[in-house]
Amino acid sequence: MLREACAVVGLAHPFRYDDPAAALALVADSDLDAVERFYPYGHDPDLAPLEELIAEEELLRTGGSDAHDRTLGVAGPAGDDWASIRVALGVDSGA
């Protein structure tokens, strides 16, 4: 239903779960479009497994800072990642 409404479906902040590896494994076995890559975790998780999953599953990188912290707007996708999201949503053709 969400895809029919022009939505990108993804897993938010995988490194906030008790078992990040299990959360990432669920993404690999799903039909998700994206995973949150850019997020102010307050610590420095090893992002290599996430980057490998993104590449293997051809996932979009999403991100941002929201109500989980006091400071808004400190994290988010870079230009190329935004462009991929816009193409996935049908906003841009990617040309």
Image (spheres, grey):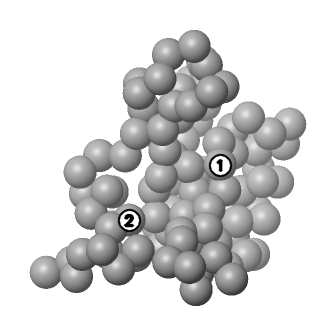
Q: Secondary structure at mark 2?
A: helix
Residue picked out by circle 1: 12
CB under 8 Å between callouts 1 and 2? no
Q: Amino acid at mark 1?
A: Ala
Quadrant placement of the N terminus: bottom right
Does residue 57 appear in this view? no
Q: 7 or 64, which lies in front?
A: 7
Residue picked out by circle 2: 85
In this picture, residue 29 sits left or right of residue 79: right
Residue 92 higher or lower than 53, as above or below: below
Q: Amino acid at mark 2?
A: Ile
Residue 89 placed where, x, y %? 41, 74
Q: Secondary structure at mark 1?
A: loop
Q: Which corner quadrant of the image does residue 93 belong to?
A: bottom left
| Residue lying at 23% horizontally and 51% vertically, measured from the top left | 79
Q: Which residue is the extreme one toward the right?
A: 18
In this picture, residue 62 sits left or right of residue 22: left
| Residue lying at 37% horizontally and 46% vertically, measured from the top left | 77
Q: Which residue is the extreme one toward the left?
A: 95
Whichever of labels 1 and 2 marks the residue nearer the N terminus, that label is 1
